[in-house]
Image (cartoon, grey):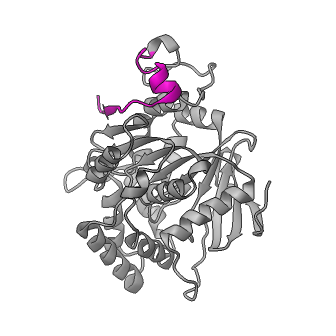
Amino acid sequence: MGDSGGSVVSVDIDRISFGGKEHHIQTKHGPVSVAVYGDHDKHALITYPDIALNHMSCFQGLLFCPEAASLLLHNFCIYHISPPGHELGATPISPSSPVQSVDELADQVAEVLDFFGLGSVMCLGVSAGAYILTLFATKYRERVLGLILVSPLYKTPSWTEWFYNKLMSNLLYYYGMCDMVKDCLLQRYFGKRVRGGSVVPESDIMQACRSFLDQRQSMNIWRFIQTINQRHDLTESLKQLQCRTLIFVGENSQFHTEAVHMTAKLDKRYSALVEVQACGSVVTEEQPHAMLIPMEYFLMGYGLFRPSHVSSSPRSPLNPFCISPDLLSPESMGVKLKPIKTRANLGV
């Protein structure tokens, strides 16, 4: 384990599956919590969640999908970075502590890599977390092998997003995690089918997320919203990205248009867009199976595969002869990634 000059306290968290360990690392821009899963000798996968979420509420659905778990845990040691004060059992951040900027959070990611002695890494981020990791990739290009972005942000907030963020900030500041804040966040995360309505009851995912949000520290969430609401435009920086990028976005995501526009700004030879039907922003929780096949094809370009002893799945072909020859061409798999627009529908 490397050390960049920060201090760390490591504690086993029984509630974390797969034998994870949570590290609390002191960086130049404040403390950060990192939950680590897997073999440290494997390639590193860095994750960063959306507002008010952490790895247990943002990536658990994906990692509880057996096929995805075998793909990711077979190839990676996963380092789940939580936004400041979003980790399990977090205490309120002192009001005297300055609110970090998006650039400081991106620099904090670099310090985490230094602490663990990591070189180049794969990144997986959701919405606000996708923005932080994209910013990190533009600032530290040599340290990012590839980006897997879910309903990503890359521009300054639209008026609609700015208004909702401002509304949530004011409610959190004066009333804490009230029902209106939870409704705003759940609308941000999930599509209509999961949220339910007057006739259709809320799904189990919704109920679990409501319960999770009740446990969050309101002012810590307020701070992260302040940070994200003051983000800057990455349009010009996207042209400098040197890694391949796979983008997922839910058809009903509030950030659908932004994800499509972001894909158009990237080099089409090294980027791909996957649209998931009947899904909101947090595809990792709402429809994680829709991510599996595109991730398999994407990771094949790095020579990474699922273990052959895992039984085959109609949604996840392991036999090379089941894969389109075009997708296995040197252009798409070895050197370049073709732009692919896929509409995944699990309702069939």
**Residue appearing at x 29%, y 28% in the figure:** 348
Q: Main secondary structure of the magenta part?
A: loop
Residue 201 seen in the figure: no
Q: Is residue 341 above or below residue 124?
A: above
| Front-lying residue, 336 or 25 | 336
Q: Do we see residue 172 in this rendering?
A: yes
Q: Is residue 334 magenta?
A: yes
Farthest left residue in view: 199
Where residue 62 sits: x, y (%)? 50, 42
Q: Is 33 on the left-hand or right-hand side of 334?
A: right
Of 45 and 12, nearer the camera is 45
Query: What residue do we see at 27% from left, 66% from top?
Result: 158
Residue, x 64% and y 19% (percent of image)?
309
In this rendering, the answer to whether 114 lies above or below 269 is below
Which residue occupies the extreme bottom position in the image? 96
Residue 130: image quadrant is bottom left
Q: Is residue 165 magenta?
A: no
Q: Is residue 275 left or right of residue 318?
A: left
Name the quadrant containing residue 174.
bottom left
* Position of residue 287 in the picture relative to residue 348 (left or right): right
Rendered location of residue 36, percent (x, y): 68, 52
- Name the residue at 35% across, 37% down: 274
**Whole-percent x and y of residue 178?**
37, 75
In the rendered image, residue 131, in percent from the top left (x then y), is placed at: 44, 58
Q: Which residues are magenta?
A: 323-348
